[in-house]
Amino acid sequence: MSRPGADRPTTVAVVLALAGIAIAGYLTWVHYEGLSPVCTTGGCERVQASSYSEIGPIPVALLGLIGYVAILASLAIRGDVGRAATFMLTLAGFAFSLYLTYLELFVIDAICQWCVASAVVMTALLVTASVRLLRPAAPAPPARP
Amino acid sequence: MPAFGSLYVPGSMSSRAETKKAAREARLRAEREEAERQRRQRIWSLAGGAALLAALVVVVLILVSAGGSSDEEASGEVAQFDGIPQKGIELGDPEAPVTLVEFADPQCPFCKEYTTEDLPPLVEDYVAGGDLRMELQLLTFIGPDSESIARAALAAGEQDLMWQFMDVAYARQGVENSGYADEEFIDGVAEAAGVDVDQMNEQSGTEAVTRKLEEAQAAATDAGINSTPSFLVGPTGGKLLPAQQEGLADAIDQALADSQ
């Protein structure tokens, strides 16, 4: 995905998306295996057992995994439409992360380190995607004489 | 620096070329600026559209997520317990050769899933026939609503109707820690479960119920339980071992085979 000549924000976004896939992939695996996630904050179990850990039949962790994979795929789309798609996905991911963090702090009353890590990655992705979308176009290469 | 002669010879070849070049550069610059202006406009409209779409996706996700699974009319499968001996937290023949202990939090969604999907066949296949007795140990780690329901359930257990009570409570499980387990909810569950509501409310706050909650927590700690639902299976009166939810029937079959 990070092809030769890819610009720096794109490379950073690819690395962040891969980190997100690793986090969400781990939580999805733990969910389906019925295991307890490795947890240093003590709240993962409670968050995982919460009714908010699933939306209908879909675990939120799987939704996150799908989101990160979609972000990674959008990074391969060239041009402004691709950049706008990445921006849309990261903005949606960021807003949903905000909602989930609110739930953790004020409703479930427990913090899960993996969810916090995912929220941080998603925030960084939104910043990177915004930079990619809004920065001026690269100057055209000089014309051949 | 221009050639000295060119300053005095207007219309010379070199001056015309420079003027033409300057005009071309100015035109190109204007074109670039116009292109960049158009690109910016396009990007802002793309960003606006993307933001709208993102907002729509998130609103839908939040609505579906918070829609919750509360079903105020659900009554569970209370009929499955008809004709089966029940005492306090125990269900089934006390002399049954195998015991299954479930550790559950009333607000835990996976416990609800177990109660609605896995419990009925176990009751029908093993408990009704006298092969298995069950114990339901209620934990309250999720929050205050867990404790309200657990206290009422243990009080319903004084009327030997705890299993019916919890069946209905899970069927009507609300949004976690939303304060859904209020007096109206508890009384409604009790009525649907066939519990004497006044008697239950008199007993739910007693020291005896508090002691039972502490005993359940102590049993969970002793067994190293740190999530719900968790299960122990083994010979009645003997050593019980942890079992996975999806392998409960196999664990019960094994314990039955060992007991013969």
Image (cartoon, rainbow, N blue to C red):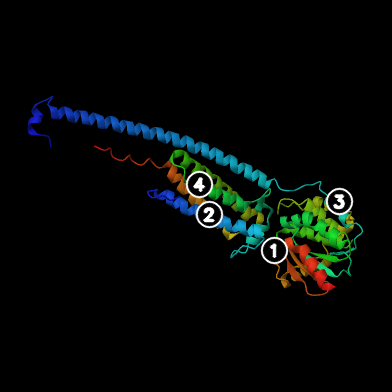
Which is more toward the observer, B147 or B249?
Answer: B249
Which is more toward the observer, A10 or B22?
Answer: A10
Q: Amino acid at mark 1?
A: Ser
Specify few, some or many for label 4: CA neighbours under 10 Å numbering under 14, 14-19, or 20 or more: some
Residue position for label 2? A20
Tag 2–tag 3 contact (CB < 8 Å): no
Secondary structure under tag 3 reads helix
The answer to whether residue A144 of the structure is visible from this angle is yes
Q: Amino acid at mark 3?
A: Ala
Residue position for label 3? B192
Tag 1–tag 2 contact (CB < 8 Å): no
Q: Are marks 3 and 1 on the same chain?
A: yes
> Where residue B11 sits: x, y (%)?
13, 24
Secondary structure under tag 2 reads helix
Residue position for label 1? B227
Q: Mark 4 to mark 3: distance in Å?
A: 51 Å
Q: Chain of mark 4?
A: A
> Where residue B111 sits: x, y (%)?
74, 58
For marks 2 and 3, give the one nearer the viewer.
2
Residue position for label 4? A73
For marks 4 and 2, give the one nearer the viewer.
4
Q: Chain of mark 1?
A: B
Q: Residue furthest bottom?
A: B238
For marks 1 and 4, give the one nearer the viewer.
4
The answer to which image quadrant residue B12 occupies is top left
Q: Mark 4 or mark 2: name the one nearer the start of the chain.
A: 2
Q: Mark 3 to mark 1: distance in Å?
A: 29 Å
Instruction: Name the side, left or right, on which B19 lies relative to A95.
Output: left
Q: Mark 3 or mark 1: name the one nearer the start of the chain.
A: 3
As drawn, B6 above or below B209: above
Secondary structure under tag 4 reads helix
